Image (cartoon, rainbow, N blue to C red):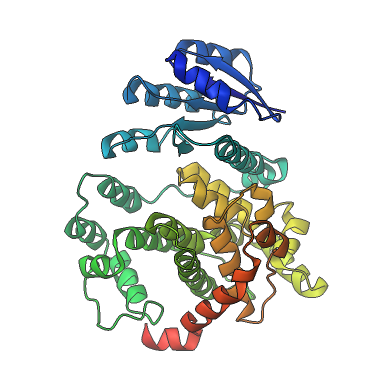
Amino acid sequence: MRKVLFLDEKYDAVGGTRWLMRSVERWRPVYVRTADEALRALDADEGFDAVVINPQSTVVSGAAFLAEVMRRHPRTVRIVLSDRIGQEELVRWLGPAHRRLSRSCSTSELEDALERACALRDLLTNESLQRIVSQINSLPSLPAVYAELVEELQTAQPSVRKIGEIIARDVALTAKVLQVVNSAFFGLRRRITSPAEATMFLGLDAIVSLVLAINVFSQFEAQRLPRFSPTALWTHSLQTGLFAKRIASLERQSDKNAEEAFTAGLLHDAGKIVLATALPEWYEQALALMRKEELSFAEAEREVFGTTHAEVGAYLFGLWGLPDQIVEAVAFHHRPQDAKANDFCALTAVHVANAIEHEGRAERAQIDADYLDALRLIERFTTWQQACAKMRIEPDQEAEEA
């Protein structure tokens, strides 16, 4: 049974959360009305899985409380219940909160958010993953240019010109962005010659996601392994991101959700780069085992490492503070049912996009039909498959037009 702490300074709202949790048998709720009470409860009992705060007083004090929880109890899931939230307030919550839900959310919505966040936390703290991460001398830090771009995105009126200027400061990054944007993958009708132009054509969120992915791949100089191609992995990742965004759009997801799917698709296999660079001999063993036993690569990784590239990548992005929806999609893209998600999300799009992309290259990657069936989406698979087939770019064609 999971234990959750509810903090709300107003009596009526506490009564509301009591009512909200009345039918949830798998959760043991504890209710407090002040931040001091909450911190004392958390300090006295390490068994709390989550804290839910209803910030009806001030955003500043509420965000400060969550930041303190993050410092003292980093494994505790942190959720905010809030209806109206402006840009300035949203920026304050971005760091310390894992999820934000409406105060009028249903019991099932809150339960789903709590279960998904706890499932992700449990995955990223398993012993096998910790053992592998401890073998890696150093994990890369969040790219500085990405942090700068996100800061610009969070201003009241993000500027295309400013985004372009930030990218243009890095000559190598500028060259890579323009190469990718002008490739056949994006199918633009004219040649793009500057980062600002690229931002205008692709949109602010898409270009920032692209910069993050390029930085992730460029930070690792993968060992020259006979059966590992960083270029092929980049091509697969970019195609998967585009497929995932298209699938999300077909399901009439919001622009924000579609961009999250794109970002998660770009990053879903980044853990392979980490492992190939940091533990090349083990990685070679996994590749050899995959071919000898006719396993999927994730199955071979679990045999050799005790974990997979999905979990390693998610661990890295969790450290960087990327949104939970993206970390979740990276973590569970091979095993979506483990995420406890009850509706279509970035994970759904990336799981399907990854399988479709592999299928087109005659590689093994299976759709979890039970997962799609549980979401009542199994009949949509053929539609997604056909839409992605029209977007597929073969490596030779991409290279010619890049």
Q: Nearer the viewer, residue 22 or 311?
A: 22
* Residue 60: % across, % down: 32, 24
Which residue is at a point 75% across and 62% down the rendered structure image?
Answer: 299
Which residue does the image show at 40% across and 57% down from the upper left? 254
Viewed as shown, does residue 284 lie left or right of 112?
right
How far from the left and from the top, in percent, is residue 339? 64, 48
Tell me if residue 46 comes above or below residue 139 in the rendering.
Answer: above
Residue 207 horizontal side relative to residue 275, left or right: left
Nearer to me, 162 or 86 = 86
In this rendering, the answer to whether 187 lies above or below 177 is below
Q: Residue furthest right?
A: 293
Q: Is residue 59 visible?
A: yes
Of residues 327 and 31, the one nearer the viewer is 31
244 lies left or right of 255 = right
Q: Quadrant of the N terminus?
A: top right
Q: Quadrant of residue 274?
A: bottom right
